[in-house]
Amino acid sequence: RLNRVLQHEQGFADRFLPDDEAARALGRTCWEALVNPLVQSITSPDSSGISPLAWLLSKYLESMELPRRAMSHDDIFGSRVRRLTQLLVHVDPGDPDPDEARAAGCPQSCAEPGLSLSRWEGGEEQGGASQGCKSSSLWGILQCWRGVVQQQVQRFLQAAGQAPDLVERYCGLYQRLRRATEELFGQQASFVLALGQGFAGALQELSFLTTLHVSEQFARYLDRQIQDLHRAAGSAGPVQQLQQMLEPFIVFSGLELAHTFEHFYRHYLGDRLLAQGPSWLEGAVVEEIGQCFPSRFPQGMLSNLVESEELRQQFHLFQLQERDRQLLDL
């Protein structure tokens, strides 16, 4: 019904309000009257501390873990949740599958693409609600998603904190929640940031001993991955894999965990440098996750290696000059 109201508003603006400023004013009014109260209602926690939107998002994540079946109840539920969240954050979800719409019991008008209050032409917003107008409602949804992510990560760490494949499963969880973020909210950087904040919030609550254990596991995992990329050097694979491999670790920035992670990482880095020598890959890794090293020890180690190599070359040239001078004296 909300979608149909927004379609009606957009049709009215297109037909009777050719002036962009008037269309934007109408869009702001509709957004403030319809969407803001709705978002405030569904993001307000009940007596148990869970908001309706948080419950929906948690159920959506649970449905992602279930095996897929053709046109199941979970598919219909997931489609409805995605269309709701995309509408609320101003993303046009596009045409749903007609069969899916019929299975959900929607009439043909409901199966039409959800229209938002903004009109996009040439990549610029032509009308409807502005970013500032929807900032309060968007903030509520952002905080809700952050809380859902934090709860998911907390449950994972409680269940798998001592597992030997902790980091592999952690990276899998990050990729799953990253994919869910895009499915639910589109390519909006603010929701990716909320995703990282949710991970950081859960990691921040670990005990000191657990933090030590987890940090060492993370550093050891990266050591194995970097060595594998070393062996694959020369192909396009390492360059393409590097950023995706390191993205789950960027959330360490600013946490106490970053200090212990840096401590273990620099020891593994030292072993790699002694065994394999410096390489562009080590520099690329440090550049990508450098914010996770509060004391900048890895950066200092690589910088010292570069300086040492320059001094070695200068000494080599000095030796050649001395030898040439001795030969001239003969």
Image: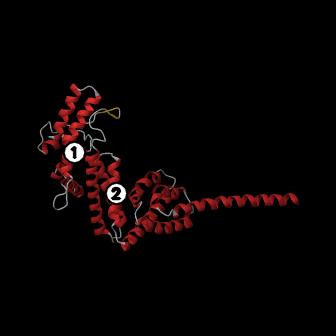
Label 2 crowd bin: few (<14), some (14–19), many (20+), radius 10 Å: many
Q: Secondary structure at mark 1?
A: helix
Question: Looking at the image, what colour scheme do you see?
Answer: secondary structure
Numbered circle sitting on residue 36: 1
Report, in whole angstroms, how far the alpha carbon at label 2 lies from the one at label 1. 24 Å
Where is 43 relative to 258, above or below? above
Q: Nearer the viewer, residue 306 or 134?
A: 134
Residue 113 visible (yes or no)? no
The type of residue carrying mark 2 is Gln
Q: Position of residue 84 (x, y in %)?
A: 21, 46
Quarter of the figure with residue 111: top left
Residue found 15% across the figure and 42% down from its top? 101
Quadrant of res 47: bottom left
Q: Quadrant of the N terminus?
A: top left
Q: Position of residue 91 (x, y in %)?
A: 27, 42
Asked where in the image residue 59 lies, by quadrant, the reply is bottom left
Earlier along the polypeptide chain: callout 2 or callout 1?
1
Q: Quadrant of the C terminus?
A: bottom right
Q: Position of residue 220 (x, y in %)?
A: 44, 67
Element type at mark 2: helix
Q: Amino acid at mark 1?
A: Asn
Please tell me whether residue 193 is drawn above or below residue 319 in the rendered image.
above
Check disc 2 and report the residue beneath it. 197
Q: Residue at x 84, y 59 (%)?
A: 327
- Asked if residue 132 can be seen in this view, the reply is yes
Say left or right for 288 vs 5: right
Circles 2 and 1: CB atoms closer than 8 Å: no
